[in-house]
Amino acid sequence: MKKPYLWDSYSDQPYQLKDRTFKKKGRKKELFSLLYTYLSSLLLLPLFIMLQVFVKPRKIGTKQFFGMSVNLDRFPKESVILIKELGVDTVLIRLPLWEMERLEAYVAFVQQFSEQKVILNIMQDREHVEDLELLKNDLDTIFEALHKDVSLFQIGTTINRAKWGFFSVGEYLKFYRVAYLLKKQHFPKIALMGPSVIDFEYHFDIHVLFNFVKLRFDALSALLYVDRRGAPENTQIGFDLLKKITLLDTLVFFSPKSKRALYITETNWPISQTAPYAPTSEHECVSEDLYTEYMLRYCLLSFASQRVDALYWHQLIAPGYGLIDSRDGLMKREAFEAFKVMLQQLQSMEFVHFSQHKRQYILIVKNSLQSVSVLWSLQPTTRHFSKTVHYYDHLGRENHAKHVELDTKPIYITENIHDL
């Protein structure tokens, strides 16, 4: 990564571009693409909002749904052990194109997760966006080195933020098509996804999914952050998390450019009092308690939608937003245990039912032996049962009761199938 682009190693993202003249020049060059982005969304977005009622959910199980991002530069040996402790079946690893000289280290790191499904997020820099021949050579090297170890390659990330290297969707489509042609010509068995639009800015997704460029995605990736709105149940212009997912799934369903597969490859909440590690200002940060609650409910709601194939929490070790704080050794946050308990309760389950009523939520899953009901309420309430139920709180503490107090922290009620 070269100037004016600079990497912030505290928050694992590029710094904001300070050179306004440089940004203005880059956007002016891509004026046609930018106009297409906004005009196509004005025409198509209202249509898809109406059509979403006709797009039914799929049948998605919990195995390999709950994923975790891990980082080569954040305690790599310990990360392998911690992923096993969590019980995660799928991980996402970033590989920056500006670090091609470290490819062997990345390959070795990927191969440490032989027991997990691995998603590789190939991150761009401006040099590779401008020099497509360089991009082709480096992607060819990466695919050759990792096509046997990686299940899915995420091509590019955060395409709707100039600080990440793209000034338009048009630039991204040229970038992605290099990977697509390599796949067709030399690596037909690999799977590719993109475009990794961040936040609720679906006009960029519409341009990616409805255009005249010859390419195709094996899945759509999204960095569906909702942290600036607070709780995942909160709305943004009328859309809560579930409605945002439904609309994005509708775009994928009708697109001629992608299979119907949707991955949320990055989401989290920044944690208060962690500057400069938090990726946002203190105003958007939340306490560790809220971080844990929001994380669980985001994961549960995403699964309950039955429209998301997998979700990757960002990330395992990060002082400003991870399950583990690495500022003074490795300190597991409460969220680590909560994520672990969620996986223990729900892993390898099938979806049965989801409902919400009066700010109360219930998700039911099952396997051949057990049924698990996950309950939470956005306002304190008491749930009355006809018999004593056996349940665990969000940290795995066991309880028995006939009258259960519900709040914003999910609980897991377990029942043996033969007792139902």
Image (spheres, rainbow, N blue to C red):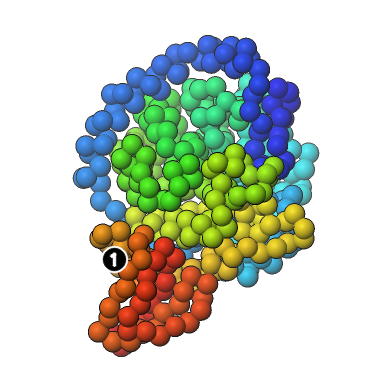
Q: In the image, what residue occupies the spot 48% across and 36% down?
A: 197
Report the amino acid beneath label 1.
Answer: His
Asked whether the viewer can see residue 178, the reply is yes
Asked whether the viewer can see residue 219, the reply is no
Image-quadrant location for residue 204? top left
Q: Is residue 116 left or right of residue 65?
A: right
Most foreground residue, 49 or 32: 49
Image-quadrant location for residue 335? bottom right
Task: State the image coordinates of residue 228 (x, y, percent, origin top left).
Answer: 48, 41
Reading the image, the residue beneath label 1 is: 353
Most foreground residue, 195 or 331: 331
> How many numbered dots are placed on residues in this image?
1
Q: In the image, what residue occupies the spot 66% across and 31% down?
A: 15
Image-quadrant location for residue 41? top left
Above or below 230: residue 131: above
State the quadrant of the N terminus.
top right
Most foreground residue, 177 or 184: 177
State the quadrant of the C terminus.
bottom left
Above or below 289: residue 160: above
Above or below 270: residue 183: above
Q: Is residue 15 left or right of residue 346?
A: right
| Element under disc 1 | strand
Q: In the image, what residue occupies the spot 43% across and 51% down?
A: 231
**Label 1 Cα crowd, 10 Å radius (few <14 / some 14-19 / many 20+):** few
Task: State the image coordinates of residue 344 (x, y, percent, origin top left).
Answer: 50, 73
Task: State the image coordinates of residue 11 (x, y, percent, origin top left).
Answer: 66, 42
Q: Is residue 87 left or right of residue 310?
A: right
Q: In the image, what residue occupies the spot 48% across and 60% down?
A: 293
Task: State the image coordinates of residue 122 (x, y, percent, origin top left).
Answer: 61, 40
